[in-house]
Amino acid sequence: MKVKLKIWRQKNAVSKGKFVTYDFDGASPEMSFLEMLDALNTTLIQKGDNPVAFDSDCREGICGACGMYINGYPNGPVKGITTCHLSMRYFKDGQTIVVEPWRAKAFPVVKDLIVDRMAFDKIQTAGGFISTNVGSAPDAHAIPVNKSKADDAFDSSICIGCGTCVAACKNASAMLFVSAKVSQYALFPQGKIEAKERVKAMIQTMDELGFGNCTNTGACEAQCPKNISIINIARLNREYFSAKIN
Amino acid sequence: MTKLNSKIPDGPLAEKWTKFKATTRLVNPANKKKLEIIVVGTGLAGASAASALGELGYNVKNFCYQDTPRRAHSVAAQGGINAAKNYKNDGDSVYRLFYDMVKGGDYRSREANVYRTAEVSNDVIDHYTALGVPFARDYGGNLDNRSFGGVQVSRTFYAKGQTGQQCLLGAYSSLNRQISKGKVTMYSRREMLELVIIDGKARGIITRNLVSGEIERHSAHAVVLATGGYGTIYYLSTLAVNSNPSAAWKAHKKGALFANPSFVQIHPTSIPQLNDYQAKLTLMSESLRNDGRIWVPKTKGDKRHPNEIPEEDRDYYLERRYPAFGNLVPRDVASRAAKERCDAGYGVSETGLAVNLDFRDAINKQGKKAIENKYGNLFEMYETITGTSPYEEPMRIYPAGHYTMGGLWVDYELMTTIPGLYAIGESNFSDHGANRLGASSLMQTSGDGYFILPYTIGNYLADDIRTPIIPTDTKEFDDAEKEVKDRLEKLISIKGKQTVTSFHRRLGKIMWNHAGMSRNEQGLKEALQMVKELKEEFWNDVMIPGELEELNQELEKAGRVADYFDVARLMITDALNRTESCGAHFREESQTEDGEAKRDDANFMYVAAWEYTGENKEYKLHKEALIYENIEVKVRSYK
């Protein structure tokens, strides 16, 4: 299978990048998209060129390391999956495929398709935790939790921190990411104690880091590889307003 | 000669840990503030240790190669985490968990360590729950449990099929809290390339900044490795593509003994290889064996669609061979049984290297909804990768390299043979003997980091309360840094013709074929020679493009593969030495008439701890005798 790849190449954070076109005939429909890039890199290395740098690790859709724009969509044309789970069977022989890094002020390009997502860590550090020390926990059954609430918390907690939501949003907003974390803790009794401080601190940090505002377009939910629901953003707003009022 | 002193406290098994905690030396809060600890790795072991040490007041420097600590490969653990809570009232206890682990490990683990891990398992669940980890619950609001292989109770806590992710995010949250307090400094995208030893003690590490390529020096009063295992030695494995044992390996070359390297777990239920370019194999959780039934056709080469093969033409070989445990036999047993059927020609799929894992009966009995609740995300993942739905037809699965029971030798305090160097989680050899039971890894690694190391490290640091911050402008740091730079320089200047990955694939094939699920003397000896030749070829003909002072992923991989040739040599050396079969280590020369593993307790009831004596020099073996006072050593049977 032959593909024409237009890939964003950028030597480092300070240099100027550009699209480079590669005619690559070593693809096959059984490959994953990243395995296709691996194969392209093999040919580049053998020619003495620099391979295309991209992040990936678990390659099973759970670590959140990979992620790139493919033909105008974050993680490519298939919904509900990470880039590493994208298969080449979704592309046609001879197709042109444009590959770009996430574009967001808060996610500067490090090299080629790799971006710096430390901003997400900073938001979590601002308050994405329950303050409990090792050794001080009561028996796990001392904190019963309603099953439907626990299930909702789980649905929020499966965010993999890949940055798709930010990349998909025209404002580069991180609201879906922040709301998923805030929701998980807001739904648990043990998370309620610090709920107000948490939501205020995480929102403030998010704003300081240069993420845009949410204008409810829903692009984040539509593209999220883990199908995190926009309901979380509604919950985040509720938490935030109630924290601000009281 | 290094003497192995496992430092196991005296007294009855159930009182050893309590006694240790009550009598160990402490470091007072004012002094903790003056002490620095390096923790390498941010998986469940590393993140839990870094946060627990930060909470105690130590100053922690935490390192990971990923862009953020939340991506460490613990994130991919699926099925669950064990604890002896006995919430199911089905007869579980700390002793029974201990018993199951020692038996599951085929009597090759250290009693006192295993018992302690079982003891702290309940604390681990309490702590994760308090941190907001969304474990599965029942309608009464209590935590739910499920069964895993090799045991007869339900003691596994879970969060659908992504328990590792949820526990790791819990540990990551506690890590973030300490980062926000300034007690932990996080160094992401850093790879440890050398250990620095001063006056015989581990005092620092040399890292490469993976973005800038800069070589950096970091010092501390103690160094903790939480760097995982060496399962990617097979190239294709269930691990992350960048998982590697190089940090532990550097420590080994600097004097830390490496124990039981041949004990590698091959997981029975992974999605089989689909193409030649594949970079990894995806695991399907062992929990699926609770409801899925494993079978192959009774007739060789039966090409009918699995749904069209009637009951009488199916061989549920695990239920047939092991009626007591059926589909829930331990992993090593299940893997070998799959290999046996496939080698005999009964395998399914085009390659014949797969068996069926069928949910038809479970769906008929419990309904699709119930199955979806338990395994929904796994079924989805399977369908995404293979294009077929496990609700409609059986999964196809095959064993894959997964977890390494072997690792750096540690004593009861989790310290290696280098004073001040600790190894926790998968990077040590500790608790799993020759085979790890499902859902024991998250338990052990969290227990090490949260509840064990924070106590034991104080016993060492109590001597260091007057030691000021370790300076990095010393000869030891100069030498270590020079070693690192010389090696990188050497690698990048080879400018050969073959890619790093091509070497890794070839090494993986050698190890899979000769030191995988089944081993024999001749094969191992051949492998030793092949690895040696491949290593030479690598150092003459590998091609690493780019520069040292930039983000260079090929250079990163090259350093790890270069170490893997040496890891392979040690693995093979150990497998050759251990002429018995035990757990995951199956020597064809040592089996019963019906093909089960045959231990040789008279000659091999010991931990094989290997001392590195130099490049291409003979390894030196140190034996730690295993003594079982609290458990009757039996032939492991799941029939």
Image (cartoon, coloured by chain):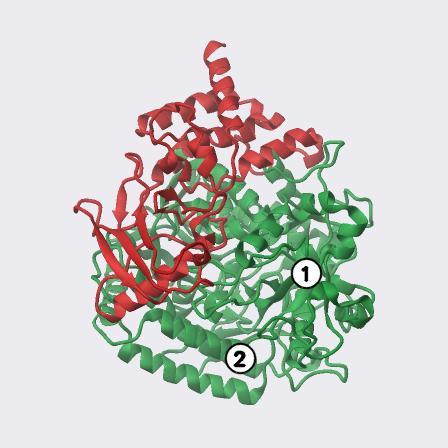
Quadrant of the frame with the C terminus of chain B: bottom right
Q: Position of residue B177 (x, y in %)?
A: 45, 34
Q: Nearer the viewer, residue A185 or A236?
A: A236
Q: Position of residue A25 (x, y in %)?
A: 33, 66
Q: Is residue B81 left or right of residue B622?
A: right
Q: Is residue B398 above or below residue A13?
A: below
User: Which color was chain A given?
Assistant: red
**Point 47% across, 21% down: residue:** A197
Q: Chain of mark 2?
A: B
Number of the label disc, if any, that sits on residue B492: none
Q: Position of residue B606 (x, y in %)?
A: 62, 74
Q: Nearer the viewer, residue A143 or B361?
A: B361
Q: Nearer the viewer, residue B95 or B526?
A: B526
**Point 64% across, 75% down: residue:** B339
Q: Marks 1 and 2: CB-CB under 8 Å?
A: no
Q: Residues within 10 Å of mark 1 (few under 14, many from 20)?
A: many
Q: Is residue B316 above or below residue B451?
A: below
Quote the CA–CA distance across marks 1 and 2: 27 Å
Number of the label disc, if any, that sits on residue B513: 2
Disc on the earlier residue, 1 or 2: 1
Which SS class for mark 2? helix
Instruction: Tell me the residue that label 1 is attached to.
Output: B394
